[in-house]
Amino acid sequence: MRACENSKNIIFLDSHEIIIISCTKAIDLRKISAFKSSLKKMKSQHRGLTRIIKAFGYSVAGFKAAWKNEEAFRQEIIMFITLTPLAFWLGDNAIERVLLIGCLFLVLITELLNSAVEAVADGLSEEWHPMVKRAKDLGSAAVFVSLFLTAITWEIILLQ
């Protein structure tokens, strides 16, 4: 691996891959190498039904990690479990039920993506960095928008 450094970025060149890391402080090259090697391990060599079974296992592991490490995810799961039966009872037709339940799924999806961004950001650097803060703030804003959409959707359907 070869590193080229300019004023704000370090560019790593390795065979056909280029990784650009924006930084203002020195970066531990061993941490970057470990990150790249874990990315290479994640590339699946499995095909067909084996790939689907492996993907399902990774999804279950992701749900377990979110439940174990993310309090917001646990709260949103409780909200989902509580409101889903209400959606079936309060929705007058299939479209309303799909909207009520669909926005609850959107909150969970957004929270999982936000948690993934935070985990990667925390894993790359233990030091505070404005780009890491921006990434975390954007993920949090996405969760807020999905919660706001959920509140508006429920309000509109229930008040009509």
Image (cartoon, rainbow, N blue to C red):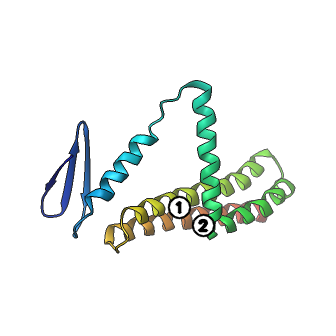
Instruction: Tally the marks.
Output: 2
Query: Could you tell me which residue is drawn at 50 percent across and 57 percent down?
Result: 116
Q: Quadrant location of the C terminus? A: bottom right
Residue at point 77% right, 51% down? 97
The answer to whether the residue labelled 2 contacts the one labelled 1, judged by CB atoms less than 8 Å apart, is yes
Q: Residue at x 37, y 67 (%)?
A: 132
* Residue 26: quarter of image: bottom left
Task: Please state the horizontal and vertical placement of residue 118, each as a whole percent of the image.
Answer: 47, 64
Q: Nearer the viewer, residue 109 or 119?
A: 119
Q: Which mark is residue 115?
A: 1
- Of 28 and 51, nearer the camera is 28
Percent position of residue 56, x then y: 63, 40
Q: Amino acid at mark 2?
A: Glu
Residue neighbourhood size for the residue with mark 2, other residues' Cα within 10 Å, grouped as few (<14), some (14–19), many (≥20):
some
Q: Say left or right for 143 vs 82.
A: left
Q: Is residue 66 left or right of residue 35?
A: right
Residue shown at the point (65%, 56%) measured from the top left: 64
Q: Amino acid at mark 1?
A: Ser
